[in-house]
Image (cartoon, rainbow, N blue to C red):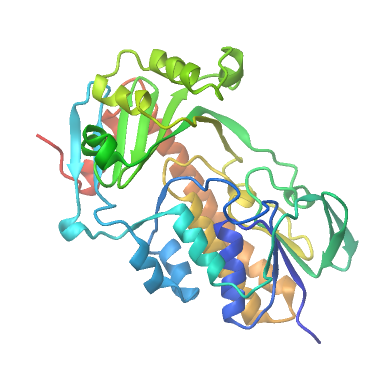
Amino acid sequence: MSSPSIAIVGAGLGGLVLARVLQMHGIPSTVYELDAAADARDQGGSLDMHEESGQLALREAGLYEEFRRLTHPQGEAMRVLDRAGTVFIDHAPEDGEGGRPEIDRTALRDLLIASLAPGRIVWGHKVTAVRPLGGGRHELTFAGGGGTSADLLVGADGTWSKVRPLLSDAQPEYCGISYLELRLSDVEERHPDSAALVGPGIMFALSDNKALMGHGGDHIHLGASLRVPQDWTVSGGVDWSDTSAARDALLAEFADWSTELTDLIRNCDDTIVPRLIHALPTGHSWARTPGVTLLGDAAHVMSPYAGEGANLAMLDATELALAIAEHGDDVETALTQYEAAMFPRSAAAAEESAQGLDMCFATDAPRAMVAFFAEAGAPEEH
């Protein structure tokens, strides 16, 4: 019997790792991606790769050494401040090396894309509908017409997955946090004070249910986040595409924060992107359904406040690929094995992420985070 045809919806990190590890085992697959090209949109900021998940995936993908050459020097440094700019934690691993090296999300995605055989990714194919054909096969319909079918369909298509409804009626819910994505470019030359404030790694500035969180380096990728109603970004009458108006609105929200922190807003680049943080219910799962499964955010989107999302997606992809390689034509056994491990793992991570959100967004923040890291062994600043 020939190998089953495998369709992967979504060329995010999870979908790409799945295709790459399958390729390492001689198993073809096709990734369908709505973007017209790899550089069609910004991929976001920096990621820390966890040894037991993201790094494991990169080893299985045969890309670990290339990954290490792309990581940030001193990227695992961490600073925790309050709204006054008081530093509670200023920590860097010895020799700049810890267990969770940082890499730009775009650089990691480009590495995975380059590792795939030509034609493995089909760009500009937005999935608009999926339907079962019987016998575990599914049909995909694309925007603009056309479609395809597959013996195994994997939804790696993120928070608003088109594949998820085949398995679950669950919908992501607003977590109470709205996030404005900011960036400061060429900071060493243009904004040296901000570069020094954030440092080469991650900075958490937390107070009164608000946060400025960012990763440093050659540029600062920053989030200005607030605990606000779901309609906050639309009900206030702010045109977020008007950079001047957007800056003014954010500066008003952070008016009682120190100038050195609000300079991160005042001096940001001319693109401010509002985002709402959503999560699926903790412990989201589904009954085994022939010929289809999910990975990453499609399966278990959670808030980003434990740094688990990308790592879990990459681990999901790796374990799914290895199960397929192990069981060959027996797709259902492979999917059962994969889901049995993925469901409890993602439930634990979702609970950790919810706790991380509560640590970051509290009236007495950053007290809980300082206590958490002190217990974990990060020294406090005196």
Q: In this view of the protein, which residue sits in the foreground, 242 or 5?
A: 242
In the displayed orientation, state which residue is furthest to the front.
Answer: 189
Q: Position of residue 143 (x, y in %)?
A: 82, 49
286 vs 336: above or below: above
Q: Position of residue 100 (x, y in %)?
A: 33, 58
Q: Is residue 368 left or right of residue 285?
A: left
Q: Residue at x 55, y 32 (%)?
A: 275
- Residue 35 vs 334, above or below: the answer is above
Q: Residue furthest bottom?
A: 1
Residue 137 in view in this figure: no
Residue for point 57% across, 59% down? 14
Task: Determine which quarter of the picture holds residue 86.
Answer: top left
Q: Nearer the viewer, residue 2 or 266?
A: 266
Work out whether 297 lies above or below 280: below
Any part of residue 133 in sight: yes
On-image quarter of the C terminus? top left
Q: Nearer the viewer, residue 138 or 247?
A: 247
Please provide percent x and percent y for residue 37.
63, 56
- Looking at this view, name the residue that lies furthest to the right: 133
Quarter of the image for residue 282 reads top right
Residue 145 spot, x, y in % from top left: 88, 53
- Is residue 92 found left or right of 65 in the rendered image? left
For the image, the number of numbered tags is 0
Where does the N terminus fall, quadrant-wise?
Answer: bottom right
The structure residue drawn at horizontal position 35% and vertical position 67%, both measured from the top left corner, is 68
